Image (cartoon, rainbow, N blue to C red):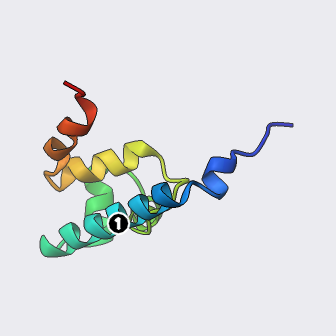
């Protein structure tokens, strides 16, 4: 039997708080653009539940959902500084 990923069940506090803040920021950005959850879900090619989970900052939500939301909201360029250590 495969082990459960404990990181998904109880991530470090700072990781959990950062995910919640990111989710909140994604929600705010979506609302500022007057987009519904269904509209942005369709734009990124996923279901509304994945968007809801990302906006709640759930650690079990795949990074691709977070990145696609940043892309759809035209915020992906802000991640370049994080991805490029130089």
- Give the answer, above or below, for where 82 lies relative to 35: above
Which image quarter: residue 67? top left
Which residue is located at x 24 percent, y 51 percent? 70
Q: Is residue 60 left or right of residue 68?
A: right
Which residue is located at x 44 percent, y 64 percent? 17
- Give the answer, above or below, for where 64 lies relative to 16: above
Which residue is located at x 26 percent, y 66 percent? 25
Tag 1's secondary structure?
helix
Q: Position of residue 37 (x, y in %)?
A: 32, 69
Q: Quadrant of the N terminus?
A: top right
Q: Quadrant of the C terminus?
A: top left
- Give the answer, above or below, for where 71 lies relative to 16: above
Which residue is located at x 49 percent, y 53 percent? 61
Which image quarter: residue 81? top left
Q: Is residue 49 visible?
A: yes
Q: Nearer the viewer, residue 17 or 2?
A: 17
Q: Is residue 45 visible?
A: no
Q: Position of residue 40 (x, y in %)?
A: 27, 61
Tally of marks = 1
Q: Nearer the viewer, residue 13 or 73?
A: 13
Q: Is residue 39 left or right of residue 15?
A: left
Extreme residue toward the top, this view:
86
Q: Position of residue 75 (x, y in %)?
A: 16, 51
Q: Position of residue 59 (x, y in %)?
A: 52, 55
Q: Nearer the viewer, residue 37 or 67?
A: 67
Give neighbour class at mark 1: few <14, some 14-19, many 20+ (Cα, 10 Å): some
Q: Which residue is mark 1?
A: 21
């Amino acid at each position: 039997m495969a082990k459960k990923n404990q990181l998904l069940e109880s991530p470090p506090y700072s990781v959990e708080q950062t995910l919640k803040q990111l989710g909140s920021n994604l929600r705010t950005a979506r609302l500022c653009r007057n987009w519904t959850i269904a509209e942005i879900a369709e734009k990124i090619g996923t279901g509304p539940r994945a968007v809801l989970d990302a906006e709640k900052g759930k650690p079990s939500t795949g990074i691709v959902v977070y990145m696609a939301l940043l892309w759809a909201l035209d915020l992906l360029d802000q991640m370049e500084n994080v991805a490029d250590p130089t």
